[in-house]
Image: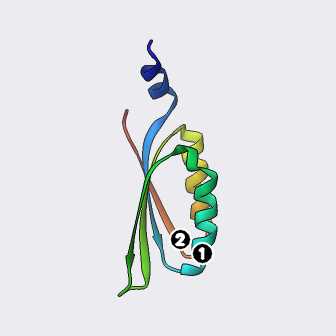
């Protein structure tokens, strides 16, 4: 087994979709994301000023435990909605 195959067996690609309905929670959200920055491949944030919300997508390469822990911490923040999608590979 080569290194790439070993990494793929231990980690998965996941997308965490986040809707921020209260900008007062953004500092906590960013602190949590910084704690997991070693697993984050990319991040995109889109503010929707008309509705007063932000939509953020986070792409991760991490173990199931790490992905679940991050999703859980984010989901506990007030006025933050989180959904996670896992790759099949």
Q: Give the CA distance from mark 1 to mark 2.
A: 8 Å
Placement of 59 over or under 31, stated as above or below: above
Name the front one of labels 1 and 2.
Answer: 1
Residue name at image x 44 percent, y 14 percent: 2
Q: Under tag 1, what secondary structure?
A: helix
Placement of 78 over or under 4, stated as above or below: below
Between 64 and 49, which is closer to the camera in this rendering?
49
Q: Under tag 2, what secondary structure?
A: strand
* Residue 43 position by quadrant: bottom left
Residue 25 image point, x, y percent: 60, 75
38 sits to left or right of 18: right
Residue name at image x 45 percent, y 12 percent: 1
Between 72 and 8, which is closer to the camera in this rendering?
8
Residue name at image x 54 percent, y 39 percent: 64
Residue 87 image point, x, y percent: 38, 40
Q: Quadrant of the image for the C terminus?
A: top left
Residue at the spot of label 2 = 80
Label 2 crowd (10 A; few <14 / some 14-19 / many >=20): many
Q: Earlier in the sequence, mark 1 or mark 2?
A: 1
Q: Are marks 1 and 2 in contact (CB under 8 Å)?
A: yes
Residue at the spot of label 1 = 25
Residue name at image x 64 percent, y 68 percent: 28
């Amino acid at each position: 087994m080569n290194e790439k195959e070993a990494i793929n067996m231990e980690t998965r690609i996941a997308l965490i979709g986040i809707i921020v309905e209260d900008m007062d929670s953004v500092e906590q959200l960013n602190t949590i994301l910084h704690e997991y920055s070693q697993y984050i491949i990319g991040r995109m944030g889109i503010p929707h000023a008309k509705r007063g919300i932000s939509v953020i997508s986070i792409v991760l390469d991490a173990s199931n435990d790490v992905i679940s822990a991050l999703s859980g911490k984010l989901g506990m923040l007030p006025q933050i909605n989180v959904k996670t999608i896992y790759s099949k590979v």
